[in-house]
Amino acid sequence: MRKQNGRFETLHARKYLQQLGKHFAHKVEVSFSETCCCVSFPFGQATISANETSLDVSLSGETEEALSKGRSVMDSHLKRFAFREAFEEMEWQDL
């Protein structure tokens, strides 16, 4: 299993976590609270957490292709939701 973490420094992390959780729940299995969201994508799992200063995403998947898809999904959705912050992409790190 491959894993990567992404971080987006923002004061609106909880707002974005709720938007992402509600949006993804229309298509895939999602469980979320005020500070954490677990998403079961066909290509892998994403755990999204929010605190006062950042939104953090932990991706897991079987292949690099799965992780690439996960990064793309997260970044593209945040780009739409965080347009006021000129978001481009998260800072991703291999684990």
Image (spheres, rainbow, N blue to C red):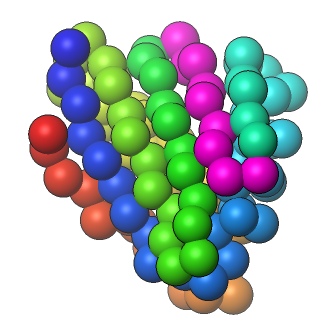
Compared across the picture, whether 81 is left or right of 85 comes to: right
Q: Is residue 88 shown above or below 1?
A: below
Examine the rendering and report whether any part of residue 80 can be seen: no
Please give the name of the residue rendered at 57% of the width and 67% of the height, measured from the top-left corner.
51
Return the x and y of residue 77 as percentages of the image width and height.
63, 54
Q: Is residue 51 shown above or below 38?
A: below
Magenta part, dominant SS: strand
Q: Is residue 77 shown above or below 13?
A: above
5 in magenta: no
Q: Nearer the viewer, residue 79 or 50?
A: 50
**Based on the displayed image, in which of its 4 quarters is residue 48 positioned?**
top right
Compared across the picture, whether 19 is left or right of 10 comes to: right
Return the x and y of residue 54 as percentages of the image width and height.
49, 71
Segment tinted magenta in the rendering: 34-42
Q: Is residue 48 shown above or below 13?
A: above
**Based on the displayed image, in which of its 4 quarters is residue 4 positioned?**
top left
Give the position of the C terminus as an image quadrant.
top left
Q: Nearer the viewer, residue 92 or 95?
A: 95
Compared across the picture, whether 35 is left or right of 90 comes to: right
Return the x and y of residue 42 as percentages of the image width and height.
53, 12
Compared across the picture, whether 66 is left or right of 24 comes to: left
Please give the name of the residue rendered at 45% of the width and 56% of the height, measured from the top-left corner.
56
Give the position of the N terminus as an image quadrant.
top left
Please give the name of the residue rendered at 44% of the width and 16% of the height, measured from the top-left corner.
43
